[in-house]
Image (spheres, rainbow, N blue to C red):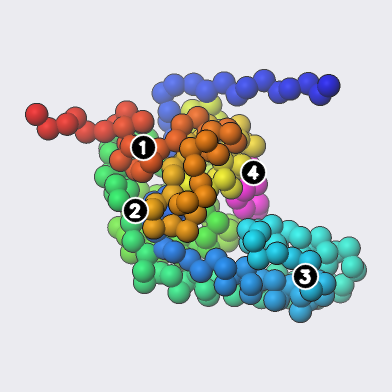
Amino acid sequence: MPVREPEPHFLEPLLGIVFDLDGTLVLSHHDFGRMRSEVIRLAERSGVSPGKLSVQDPIHRIVEATREELRNSGVPDGVFYRFEAEYQKRVDAIELEALPRTVPREGAANLLKTLSARGFRLGLLTRSSEEFARKALVRTGLDPFFSYLRSRSSPGPAKPSPEALLLLLKEMGVPLDRALFVGDHLIDAECATRARVRFYALLPDPSESTATTMSADRFLAVGASAVARDLVELTRQLNVASAPAS
């Protein structure tokens, strides 16, 4: 029987909090189905067998499977690098189409303002491109709160690789046992738990397509320490909610 690793030891109080972006702090309603279809189309044009990739998988899984298939089939390096450049360019373009309809999630500005005022170090870890993330923050008025940001455009591994979170926390100067990651997707939970960082789950906004498939039980099953219905409840869980009016 394999030896089970000990549970991570978390210290109080928290020093730094890392947030996911889309779905957690902002609502953009990206056309992920179209993104996945485009990546698969480019993968098959590059040599991946038709029908081998599924539009039901997340984009990063489709890309990982494509890379493995192309390497194993021995395609020229030029084909491999062309796929990498083309899929990123196409996904970036579709992503930016969502910018005009991107809005802050209710309670985001108040939560970030309160956390910042109380001295928490705040970071952003997103699978969005750097361009979209920065423009979305400016559009929603959340940009003043984030000096630390890692996107899929950043050098090195991207989320859900735990290394992405570890690199960001190192930049922030936050020890793992005093850090918290907040996100609304199982990818966020995977990233945090593999990095052995405490994770708080945020249930998807009712307007999101995943609202009917995600649940508190699913998040708790994959290692979430707490689950909040919305950012207002998360504010209370972090013990930074304003005192109620008398």
Which residue is tagged 1? Answer: 234
Q: Quadrant of the C terminus?
A: top left
**Dot 3 amino acid type:** Gly
Instruction: Write down the residue under mark 3.
Output: 51
Badge 1 local density, few (<14 within 10 Å), some, or many (20+)? many
Find residue 168 and report its image quarter: top right
Picture residue at 53% right of the left edge, 26% below the top: 177
Which of the image's four quarters has the N terminus? top right
Q: Which residue is mark 2?
A: 105
Relative to residue 196, is residue 138 drawn left or right? left
The image position of residue 50, as x and y in percent, is 79, 74
Circle number at residue 163: 4
Residue 27 image position (x, y, % from top left): 39, 59
- Residue that appears at 36% across and 37% down: 234
- The disc, 1 or 4, on the residue closer to the chain's N-terminal end is 4
The secondary structure type at the circle numbered 4 is helix
Camera-side mark, 3 or 4: 3
Q: Nearer the viewer, residue 174 or 189?
A: 189
Please indicate, yes or no, whether residue 233 appears anywhere in the rendered image.
Answer: yes
Which stretch appears magenta?
156-163
Q: Which mark is nearer the camera, 1 or 4? A: 1
In depth, the one of 95 and 119 nearer the eye is 95
Q: Is residue 179 above or below residue 6?
A: below
Whole-angstrom CA distance, mark 1 to mark 4, is 26 Å
